[in-house]
Amino acid sequence: MTIDERYFNDFDKQIKDFESVLMPEENILYKTKPNKKSYILSSVFKMLPFALLWLVIDSFFIAMIIYGMINGNIPISTLAFIIPFFLIHLMPVWIWIRNIIKSSLEIKNIEYAITSHRIIIKSGIIGIDFKFLTYPEIENINVKVSLIDKLCKVGDIYINASTNSAVLYDLKNPYNLSQKLQQVVVDIKADVNYPNAFRPNENNGYHTTYDSNPFNDDNK
């Protein structure tokens, strides 16, 4: 690869897709997105019981204060204190609403790519962010399925790495996808760490292309 003064200038352009961040000879094995319904519902129900309880309690006190003002037991001038107090005291409710709005906005940009070199996670609301996990640093992969995930027939894949971690949220066939992802991790790790007997048959050396693609059936 030739590097000149134009190499870094290209990064001034807005990067929006996986192809913009791929390394030389890196190819995408599989791309997917979270299930939109499950992703948003998870943010709705995550704090729902606590937020509703908090709202009911504060609403009761607000109603009592209004009733007292109507009957003249509480002076109207106390509104200068009461309004800021409850605006702050209702913070858990505002956080709950914020999380719902945030998930609704960010879902359009979230996408996952499994490549021949690494796992790429695209996200962001205003700008586009990319997170990278290389296969040699991955230590274990787990699947978790919540009640909402089960109802939507999706699941979350938790990836723990030596220097970084990530979660692939709300994916279809999470167990099957996790199994195939682990196969890629094992193949690449074997190619890097054991360059002889344990190397995958398709690869003659670390710098060769990863020819196997267990995700072929999923890409159809």
Image (cartoon, helix red, strand yellow):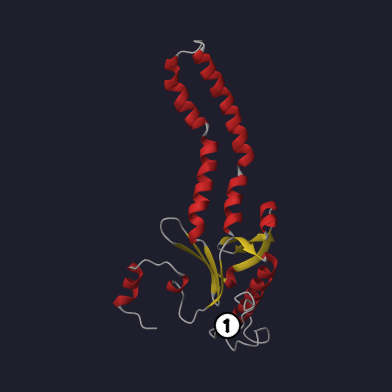
Please identify the quarter of the rendering in which residue 189 is found: bottom right
| Residue drawn at 51 percent across, 61 percent down | 110
Task: State left or right for residue 65 relative to residue 181.
Answer: left
Task: State left or right for residue 29 relative to residue 200.
Answer: left
**In the rendered image, the vertical position of residue 117 relative to residue 74, given as above or below:** below
| Residue drawn at 57 percent across, 57 percent down | 36
How many tags in the picture? Answer: 1
**In the rendered image, the vertical position of residue 200 relative to residue 8, given as above or below:** below
| Residue drawn at 40 percent across, 67 percent down | 15
Please identify the quarter of the rendering in which residue 180 is found: bottom right
Q: Position of residue 146 (x, y in %)?
A: 68, 53
**In front of the other: 186 or 67:** 67
The image quadrant where one finds the N terminus is bottom left
Of all residues, the one furthest to the front in this rendering is 70
Residue carrying label 1: 210
| Residue drawn at 34 percent across, 68 percent down | 13
The image quadrant where one finds the C terminus is bottom right
Of all residues, the one furthest to the left in this rendering is 5
SS for dot 1: loop
Q: Position of residue 141 (x, y in %)?
A: 66, 65
Q: Position of residue 215 (x, y in %)?
A: 62, 76
**In the rendered image, the vertical position of residue 79 relative to residue 132, given as above or below:** above
> Dot 1 surroundings within 10 Å: few (below 14), some, or many (20 or more)?
many
| Amino acid found under the numbered disc labelled 1 | Tyr
Q: Position of residue 104 (x, y in %)?
A: 51, 52
**In the rendered image, the vertical position of residue 114 relative to residue 35, given as above or below:** below
Task: State left or right for residue 141 relative to residue 8.
Answer: right
